[in-house]
Amino acid sequence: MLDFLVTSKVRRRLLSLLWGEGVRGSVAELAALAGVAFAGAHGELRSMREHQLVVVERAEGKDVYAANLAHPDASTLKALVATAGRRTMPRSAADETVRRKLVTLGAPLSGVVPLPVKASERASALLEGVRLARRDPSVARGLPLCVWTLRDRLSGKALQALTPRAEEKHALGFYLELTGELGSDRRLVGLAEGMRDRRVTALRGFFGDGAGERARPFPLANKWGFTMNMDRGSFATLFEKFAA
């Protein structure tokens, strides 16, 4: 229904972020998360503001947009966006299974039905999430919340035994340190160091070749050898909303 009523792909993606996932952010942040051009996002957000679908507040020197939950049709719009999310076909059955596990571990993936995960399989599910995050920006943003959920169950020995692949350990280490910073948990930061691949010296796109072309300033990602088209604030917004 949303695809029929809203013909603009840019507008649909922004509505899904703002109204479906509860994301807040500047024009640049929202454009990066939606995977659209800055100019397109700016025009749509301006129009949404004129129609009172978003509210704007000034924070840290930039305009931050959020869904206007006081709008008289807010419940209808949220239901419409949620329904559209549920009807989105997964890229593959395997990816959808991983996404469902991650929702159980705390990832706020809109329209995804949780899949129970045994306590003994949660660390493995987290690693599956790390692999999928390299291909799926929505998973990438939500993964720190999974780490946060499992933080008291993670140990250096268990993490080292989890995967023999240095690249996967390295990406997991990035998420451990990122989550440790977001949640002020020094233990996670310490665990991250044990995952680091010291052979990594050059920057490369977190989401694969070409991902660095629209890279945003992100010192922690750069420290781990990654460039990303989202910054620390993109993760912090989601983490602060759902970590509690």
Image (cartoon, rainbow, N blue to C red):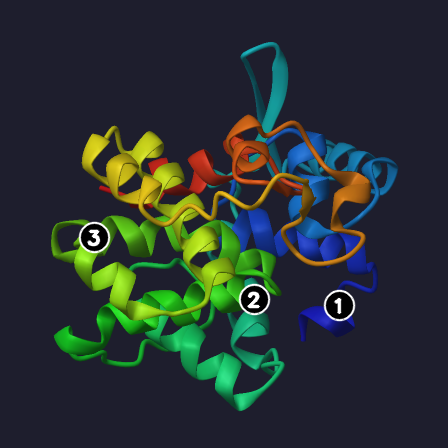
Instruction: Please state if 62 lies on the left or on the right of 192 as rendered.
Output: right
Q: Nearer the viewer's eye, disc 1 or disc 3?
A: 3
**Which residue corresponds to the image point at 64% horizontal and 52% vertical from the top-left?**
15
Q: Quadrant of the C terminus?
A: top left
Q: Which residue is mark 2?
A: 80
Q: Residue furthest front?
A: 199
Looking at the image, which is closer to me, 78 or 195? Answer: 195
Percent across and percent down for residue 34 are 69, 51
Q: Which residue is mark 1?
A: 5
Query: Of the residues shown, which amino acid type is indicated by label 3?
Result: Gly
Q: Earlier in the sequence, mark 2 or mark 3?
A: 2
Instruction: Please rate how many residues cluster around mark 2, counting C-alpha atoms within 10 Å: few if below 14, some from 14 to 19, many from 20.
Output: some
Secondary element type, mark 3 = helix
Q: In this rendering, is residue 35 above or below 214? A: below
**Which residue corresponds to the image point at 66% horizontal and 56% vertical from the top-left?**
207
Secondary element type, mark 2 = helix
Percent across and percent down for residue 161 are 26, 68
User: How far apart are labels 2 and 3 at the CA level?
Assistant: 44 Å
Percent across and percent down for residue 118 are 17, 79
**Which residue corresponds to the image point at 43% horizontal and 34% vertical from the top-left?**
236
Query: Of the residues shown, which amino acid type is indicated by label 2?
Result: Leu
User: How far apart are labels 2 and 1 at the CA level?
Assistant: 10 Å
Instruction: Please rate how many residues cluster around mark 1, counting C-alpha atoms within 10 Å: few if below 14, some from 14 to 19, many from 20.
Output: few
Query: Of the residues shown, which amino acid type is indicated by label 1?
Result: Leu
Instruction: Please rate how many residues cluster around mark 3, counting C-alpha atoms within 10 Å: few if below 14, some from 14 to 19, many from 20.
Output: some
Q: In this rendering, is residue 230 above or below 20? A: above
Q: Which residue is mark 3?
A: 156
Q: Is residue 73 visible?
A: no
Looking at the image, which is closer to me, 139 or 2? Answer: 139
User: How far apart are labels 1 and 3 at the CA level?
Assistant: 50 Å
Q: Is residue 10 visible?
A: yes
